[in-house]
Amino acid sequence: MEQALAMNIVVLERLGLSKSEFDALSKPLVDQGHDVVVYDDGKFDDDTLKQRIKTADVLVIANTPLSGDVIDAADHLKYIAVAFTGYNHIDLDKCKEKGIKVSNAAGYSTHSVAELTFGLIISVLRSMVPLEKIVREGGTKAGYRQSDLRGKTLGLVGTGDIGSAVAEIALAFGCKVIAYNRSEKPALIRQGVVYKSLDDVLKESDIVSLHVPLTDETKGLINADKLALMKDSAVLINTAIGPIVDHDALAAALREGTIAGAGLDRVDMEPPIPADYPILDAPNVVILPHVGFATDEAMVRRANITFGNILKWENGVQENVVL
């Protein structure tokens, strides 16, 4: 079989791997004769990116924004392997215009995010974050809420792969699970999940967990009106993507007692978050710096998927197709 032409593969970050892990996982590409260049200095300004991808045939990127202006500077670019599930940070219109194919790393963090969802739920229900600080200061549990997860109604907004994984864990915890999704999944229905309208899910749930992608329809989906539908004892969990929640409205709802608490792995921006961001001062909210996807095991899975995508694409079979 004829040897594939050598490609210039530019990796804009080391994908959360050590050098030895990266070298081992990217070895199949090197063994094919490809030149793999990886950057790990954390520089992602447009001018730097333009220089780094100028001669790239293949680009590997995680969740760093990639503008059309930057893509225009890549004269040889044919394929972008996104080492991430989401891809709304990439100018896909520009990719389409230039005939650049795009794949993502769908599924690498499904169970990692589902597990973190329950970490946030239990942290809020058991007041774990403030109590950890208080016990170090010699205090007690007095005045802090403690609540069981078992027996609660968990409402899912979105039952894709992650939402479905959350549903299965919730059922194992002894929760009643209701869900809103554009299409119903028979496998979940057979397990006892009941599909309802979005408004009914918000009204009936003790815990609402968000698992939808960012689209024109979902941006700002959870706004002041939707928060007002929730029980004043309810908790909102977001491990999906920040802009599906109006965070000013959420901060106000928490301060006013419209809902009882929130657990967030995502807000409107990647960390660091400005000190004056309203949700930081809201009561009973646990905020994490976007770590749902970032377990050691998930980093290995996404590298394997990403490098596998490249090898398959060069052999004429594109998987995990975005464009």
Image (spheres, helix red, strand yellow):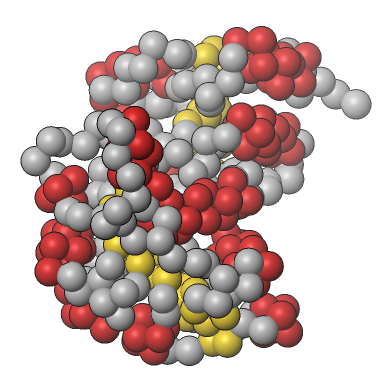
Q: Please indicate whether residue 284 sits to the left or right of residue 303 in the image.
A: left
Q: Please indicate whether residue 34 sits to the left or right of residue 202 in the image.
A: right
Count of numbered tags: 0
Q: Please indicate whether residue 320 sits to the left or right of residue 95 in the image.
A: right
Which residue is at 58% across, 87% downward?
194
Q: Please indicate whether residue 322 sits to the left or right of residue 174 in the image.
A: left
Q: Nearer the viewer, residue 281 or 221?
A: 281
Which residue is at 20% across, 74% downward?
258
x and y percentages locating residue 154 in the rendered image:
49, 74
| Residue 168 in the image: above or below residue 48 | below
Q: Nearer the viewer, residue 6 or 266?
A: 266
Which residue is at 63% across, 67% downward?
173
Q: Is residue 263 visible?
A: no
| Residue 2 in the image: above or below residue 281 | above
Extreme-left residue of the structure: 276
| Residue 205 in the image: above or below residue 268 | below
Question: Which part of the image, by quadrant, shows the N terminus?
Answer: top right
x and y percentages locating residue 102 in the rendered image:
53, 44
Which residue is at 63% across, 73% downward?
174
x and y percentages locating residue 66 in the rendered image:
35, 36
Q: Nearer the viewer, residue 235 or 4?
A: 235
Question: Which picture quadrant has residue 157?
Answer: bottom left
x and y percentages locating residue 7 in the rendered image:
62, 20
Q: Is residue 37 visible?
A: yes
